[in-house]
Amino acid sequence: MLTFRELRSKLRVAEGWSRDYFRSDTEELNLLEKADDSKSQSLEYPLDDEDRTPGKLRLVLCITTNIVSTVSIVFTNKYIFSNDTLRNCQMVFASYHFLITGLTLWVISRPFCGAFVPKSVSIRQNFHLVILTCAQVVLQNISLANSSIIFHQLVRLLLTPATALLSFLLYRSVIPKASIFPMIILCGGVGIVFWSDSYSAPNTVGATSSKGVICAFTGVIVSAFYTSLVGSYQKKLQVNSMQLLLNQAPLSASLLLCMVPFLDTPPTTTGLSPSFYVAIIASGFFACLVNVSQFAVIDAVGPVSSTVTGHLKTCTIVGLGWFLSNHSISKQSIAGILMALIGMGL
């Protein structure tokens, strides 16, 4: 029979053995887990790099497509509107753009493309934005047809201060003090270009007419209303930008077609050269690329960062318009352009 002292010593030996056993087992388990983690990391990292690289390439492709298509559609539309008969067909031209855009969005929303999932919105809930969408597109086209490219593009920069003012009036959103001074410089630069391009040389080829000025500023106000309301409508209807545009495009095309007999003058197509037909087809193609790529850029980098792309497009269009213009640009216009671009970049 074991004494108490012998029993206690044997228990200590057994306790030490079990501690060593389970410690070795735990260490072995930890080593196995680390080995599994290292294997999984070695498998995951290449896949992560592979996933990251196409994502970056996709973003660069979307930004490049958006810039090229935006610049191209401005100069293509300006060429189309240089024809007097096509200049008076604004409704059918805008309807054609909305029709092509709607068809493109419908195709990329199909399961075999899977760009986004369509969501139906009732006409009653969407009709206010449809009217604003039609108005801003038509006014922009009329402005482009009756003004210089430089003036048309610089006036579009006023959309930022106009939206800020409307947000303050509608939602009491306070404008940051740091943004007030750049907006003043921007508005001053656009004002100088407006005076120089409209009044200093009214008889010069390519000068901006009073019709172009009125439509340009009215288009900015309408676009500011649309920009101020579209965010609240998206939250209210619980749709993203592409879903909302897919609902708007067919309605906009139909509404503009109903206005064609009253506001458009039928063009005389007999005197059109083949280049005009190519330009009209290309304009619809560019319109699709602009809409789809713009939403892709906003979804990828956000609306704030996407403004950098907008600044680059503005500089490109103004620079090309300056280079390709047939009339000389005054020193006042140069000063106004620089002021507007500086105010935009601050």
Image (cartoon, rainbow, N blue to C red):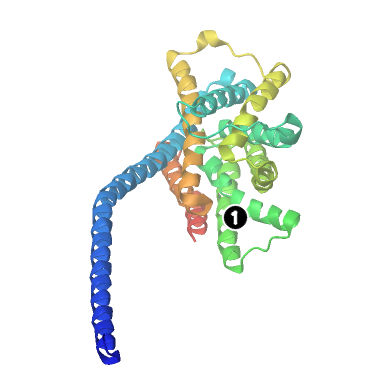
In the image, 278 versus 38, the foreground residue is 38
Q: Is residue 116 left or right of residue 312?
A: right
Vertical arrangement, residue 214 with respect to residue 301, above or below: above
Q: Position of residue 207 (x, y in %)?
A: 55, 37
Q: Can residue 180 be seen in this snapshot?
A: yes
Q: Position of residue 152 (x, y in %)?
A: 55, 40
Q: Which quadrant would residue 19 be assigned to in this image?
A: bottom left
Q: Can you name the residue that lies furthest to the bottom here? A: 5
Q: Is residue 165 left or right of residue 332?
A: right
Mark 1 element type = helix
Please tell me which residue is depicted at 64% across the width and 30% down the height of the picture: 247
Q: Is residue 53 left or right of residue 252?
A: left
Q: Position of residue 187 (x, y in %)?
A: 59, 55
Figure disc tally? 1
Q: Position of residue 278 (x, y in %)?
A: 44, 18
Vertical arrangement, residue 70 with respect to residue 269, above or below: below
Local crowd at mark 1 within 10 Å, few (<14), some, or many (≥20)? many
Q: Can you name the residue that lies furthest to the top here? A: 270
In the image, 89 versus 227, the foreground residue is 227
Q: Quadrant of the N terminus?
A: bottom left
- What residue is disc 1 on? 187
Please tell me which residue is depicted at 64% across the width and 34% down the height of the picture: 139
